[in-house]
Image (spheres, rainbow, N blue to C red):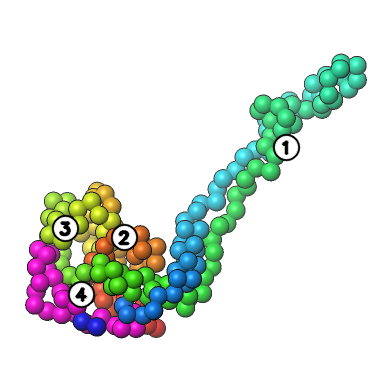
């Protein structure tokens, strides 16, 4: 599959890029996408939630009042969950939410996500570029040239570029990642996908192992 290559001004360079049919024209597997996205979101959870239980509340252990003769229910401690300030019953405890996933399933999910972008005609290939200075205005101009202002946009570069990253980090709904870090969630979460020429062979080498 061939597609036009654009420059950062939004104009065609007259060149074409070869996209692997095994990636960009593959039949999407929705179940693999579901498993991978579920795993990604689960792995983001810290799992550090905690509430104090009865044995951990710092209150007096003294019996409230005598056992019999008061007309009240019997109680032995203010730490009981029934009292305000008492321990929590079955509260959350620290745990690991991470979900392992098969490498082939993960690769299939990313391939499926990219093929969906091609079907939706929301994938654009741009020639390699760098910013000499980390100026947000330059990145905004790039988005304007592709009519992507206020649209969720994912830009995939061949490798980490400090100036481009600094120029884009304050722009809402825009994310920039190196090709080695692509994942299903970021691809699907973006309304538009911009891939630089240099990132294409890296993506293919990762997904077609």
Quote the CA–CA distance across marks 3 and 4: 20 Å
Image quarter where the N terminus lies is: bottom left
Task: Return the residue at label 1.
Answer: 55
Q: Which mark is residue 197?
A: 4
98 left or right, relative to 107: right
Residue 51 lies in what quarter of the image? top right
Above or below, 129 against 205 in this view is above
Question: Does the segment drawn in magenta span residue 21?
Answer: yes
> What residue lies at 25% left-to-right and 73% top-to-bottom?
199
Query: Do labels 1 and 3 touch, CB within 8 Å?
Result: no
The percent position of residue 129, horizontal first and vertical second, equals 15, 67
Quote the CA–CA distance across marks 1 and 3: 59 Å
Which element carries disc 4, helix, strand or loop? loop
Task: Return the residue at label 3.
Answer: 147
Question: Does the segment drawn in magenta span residue 144?
Answer: no
The percent position of residue 179, horizontal first and vertical second, equals 30, 70
Q: Which mark is residue 196?
A: none
Discs 3/4, front:
3
Label 3 environment density (alpha carbons within 10 Å; few <14, some 14–19, many ≥20): few
158 left or right, relative to 112: left
Task: Return the residue at label 2.
Answer: 190
């Amino acid at each position: 599959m061939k597609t036009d290559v654009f420059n950062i001004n939004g104009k065609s360079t007259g060149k074409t890029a070869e996209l692997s049919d095994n990636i960009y024209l593959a039949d999407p597997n929705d179940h693999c996408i579901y498993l991978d996205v579920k795993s990604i979101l689960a792995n983001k959870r810290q799992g550090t939630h905690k509430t104090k239980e009865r044995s951990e509340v710092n209150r007096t252990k003294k019996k409230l009042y005598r056992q019999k003769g008061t007309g009240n229910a019997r109680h032995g401690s203010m730490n009981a969950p029934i009292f305000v300030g008492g321990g929590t019953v079955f509260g959350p405890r620290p745990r690991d939410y991470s979900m392992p996933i098969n490498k082939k399933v993960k690769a299939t999910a990313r391939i499926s996500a990219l093929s969906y972008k091609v079907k939706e005609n929301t994938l654009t290939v741009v020639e390699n570029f760098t910013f000499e200075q980390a100026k947000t205005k330059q990145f905004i101009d790039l988005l304007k040239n592709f009519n992507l202002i206020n649209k969720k946009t994912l830009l995939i570069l061949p490798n980490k570029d400090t100036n481009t990253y600094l120029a884009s980090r304050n722009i809402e709904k825009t994310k920039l990642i190196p090709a080695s870090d692509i994942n299903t969630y970021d691809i699907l979460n973006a309304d538009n996908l911009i891939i630089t020429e240099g990132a294409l062979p890296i993506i293919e080498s990762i997904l077609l192992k």
